[in-house]
Image: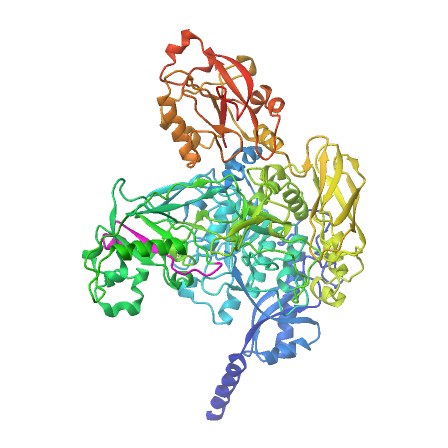
Amino acid sequence: MRVVGLSCVLLALLAFMMRGNAEVYIVMMEGEPVISYTGDIPGFEATAVDVDSDEKIETTSELVTSYAQHLEKKHDMLLDMLFDRGTYKKLYSYRHLINGFSVHISPEQAEILRRAPFVKSVERDWKVRRLTTHTPQFLGLPTGVWPTGGGFDRAGEDIVIGFVDSGIFPHHPSFASHRNDPYGPLPKYRGKCEVDPDTKKDFCNGKIIGAQHFAHAAIAAGAFNPTIDFASPMDGDGHGSHTAAIAAGNNGIPVRIHGHEFGRASGMAPRARIAVYKALYRLFGGFVADVVAAIDQAVHDGVDILSLSVGPNSPPATTKTTYLNPFDATLLGAVKAGVFVVQAAGNGGPFPKTLVSYSPWIASVAAAIDDRRYKNHLTLGNGKILAGLGLSPSTRRNRTYTLVAANDVLLDSSVTKYSPSDCQRPELLNKNLVEGNILLCGYSFNFVVGTASIKKVSETAKSLGAAGFVLAVENSSPGTKYDPVPVGIPGIVIVDVEKSADLINYYNISTPRDWTGRVKSFKATGSIGDGLMPILHKSAPEVALFSARGPNIKDFSFEDADLLKPDILAPGSLIWAAWSPNGTDEPNYVGEGFAMISGTSMAAPHIAGIGALIKQKHPHWSPAAIKSALMTTSTTLDRAGIPLRAQQYSETEAPKLVKATPFDYGSGHVNPRAALDPGLVFDAGYRDYLGFLCTTPGIDAHEIRNYTNCPCNFTMGHPSNLNTPSITVSHLVKTRTITRTVRNVAEEETYTITARMDPAIAIEAHPQAMTLRPGASRKFSVSLTVRRVTGTYSFGEILMKGSRGHKMEEQSFLDRMVTHLRSSCKYYTGYPKDLGPSRVIHFTSEREFVQVLHEGRPVVVAFTIRGNYTKHLDRVLEEAASEFYPHVKFMRVECPKYPGFCIARQKNEYPFIEIFHSPEQFLEFGLAKFCVTCGQRLLQYVAFAPFVTQENEAANQGRVGDPNITRYSVKVVPVSSESSLTFMMLIV
């Protein structure tokens, strides 16, 4: 008995020793996965998806179930044959998109597996990381896109977006189902809902249609902590709730923090369903084995869109090419199954070749700064005004407060070891000296690494009774990012080192001390401004500093790829969205229900949500067609009509703006409305992607077969011939001719094709025109010839303009404005009556006028002011302008939305406002005819001037005139004219 017992102990010890240095490995097996199986094994019929159809895998069918079980049994038999039980642990079997499994074994066992029959590759698992409101309006969704799908309450109906992220906080109002019409069953989706181990309730409610978590690899690696990571779909980080809300959160959710409402949040597709596949965790990110299992399950369950705000820490070093690894191969299988895959491009910018999303079957999304910025200021007692950041209320108006530095109000000098200048611990500071004053703190490295937070500074100041706080940044490394943080008391961060020095010098000069350095009296004073209201900039969008840049790379040696990445640009900076109160990803938002954070993680779900809207309108489009529609309709101009610019490092800490290139923004900034009706699409499928792989130099055909189970029997001459809406040639020698195929997804239309290119390269497109019937496809070719060797990239574009108005090019300022008016604006008027039914809106107070604007209706306000009855209307207009354009003054200045359309005022004119019922009414008066000079700055513009009679003038004193009793004329007035101005304000 003792001998047997001893042998059992020895066996257990041997097993433990073998697994003591164990790691997670991903093993690829011979044999086709469910998505590709063609039925060559006796007893198992084919399960492959027809790549030329839009059918999905019937995952519940007996054929699929039995073949999937067959694959899993083969995985188990191989492991049992090679290793003793207890010396390994299989984590997942991958059966649907790739054929393989992940297993926790020692490096020695991994070598045995590599030499085993039927094993194609064994790779050690690697980590992935997170790629960490106002944007629906900025993108034109409420008026230009949602109405085409039945309004916001139907936008994204029956489309399922799968989120591979950090989970979800299901109790957030952004995900509530009671706010909407009841969600019915959705038979096409077959995912399950895990039960919360604490509440014993599942995570689903109709809006959330599936919720699962994947952590086997994280547990095997010893990284998982169930106390803080939650062994459930519960979001312990905040990131997953944020991304889900951006793409598919409910519409009109008030964003309230510290008693202030920052607006109303909405997802891009507020009616879409949310399927949660948690594979990321707060401290360590995630592991590819878990992420691949999540993707495999999501496609099996029947999602339409996959949103991935996740990427590798670096290009996979274990594989020869960036396109071929278990992660990208799994996504290729997802695309083959008809799923549109969106991935964040990465946050390694502004340096080149920092992308972490490489493959052509993925939509890689860069991050833009939108038009909303938050700023604040500190006014010192010496009159200096220091700019800074702070989403806070102001100190009391017309009053200054004494400044007291944290290091000067310590209870005990021995506490300096706790970094008291960070203001993280109120018990270290003397409340009697701080109360009623502004607390001055230092922004140290602790804030950068996350061990200190602005939120905690605010709590410290509040608990000590301070009137507010100031954080001064005395040292700043290039790349340090400062975001405004909402706080409940007046507070500001002075991010400019020179301005911080001004503050500290003023404080030191104004603060007398004794010979020991102790303060005798505090004489420095200051006041904090109101930082709660955003400032809207016409220069938006801009490429964010952190957004990863191209060119794309094809291997671990960072060799340039013949494929453009990123694909598209979307808002990703300072995005308000839902947050998990459990979330600790951002220390400034611990315990909050909303957060405003930045990253390509925020940009990707914008595209996922917009992709859902396209999928809703065009349910049979392939993933490549959806991606094409987004890319070909994007814009490379900002709201002022200027070419997009990108943030870049400067000689100082502040970023500078440089002209952006496709390596910064891909095809351009997303234009959701145009993407719904692109006219033409560049389509591609599984065979095309195989051809791309087989044609790319340096990729071994055996390696391709390992990951795709397909031989290289198709090539396309050169990888740049892949049918995408972009052309990239990394090494152009002499002349290269590239072909593309477009398919007409609209009515019959004739397109003219023109091309333009940097002077170093000659470009020619053939044919120069082509007519396509509905559903027809046509090829065209583009020839590129080297004129001058430069050693750098040259950029150009192919412009395709349709006879019915479809354009794959940049629109002029006038075209874009007229298109916007035709598609999106709802106007009201009472005259002329022959233009159709209408109703008159009288504005008798500032509140009523601002309320109409807050309802989300874009309005065109055309007005003139005559006589001496202007005070009331001035207040109305000033209120409206300050709500939407706080920096606009009532003189001849450009409005942020459309340059040249200005708010102005002439004192000798009568008050009048008109709001038009339809764009046609507005256009019939001659906008297109009279807008003569439409360049970067509009020099002339149209407005409507009423002739007011003496009879109705007295009746209309003190309020807005009634359009039904006035007559109209149209006139064009140059902005520079000295004559009496008529003018228009466009609020969108």
Q: Give yes or no for residue 473 being in the magenta stretch.
A: yes
Q: Is residue 150 visible?
A: no
Residue 264 picture location, percent across and down: 43, 40
The one nearer the camera, 58 or 594, is: 594
State whether residue 618 is above or below residue 318.
above
Residue 391 picture location, percent across and down: 37, 47
The answer to which image quadrant residue 507 occupies is bottom left
State whether residue 403 is above or below residue 394.
below
Colour pattern of the rendering: rainbow
Q: Residue at x 54, y 77 (%)?
A: 22
The one nearer the camera, 587 or 936, is: 936
Is residue 533 found left or right of 541 in the rendered image?
left
Q: Residue at x 61, y 28 (%)?
A: 933
Is residue 428 found left or right of 899 in the rendered image?
left
Residue farthest along the top direction in this orientation: 951
Residue 942 picture location, percent across and down: 55, 23
Residue 566 picture location, percent across and down: 62, 52
- Point out the stretch of residues depicted in magenta: 461-479
Q: Is residue 364 visible?
A: yes
Is residue 226 found left or right of 645 in the rendered image?
left
Number of marks: 0
Q: Give yes or no for residue 282 being in the magenta stretch.
A: no
The one nearer the camera, 405 or 314, is: 405
The one nearer the camera, 699 or 468, is: 468
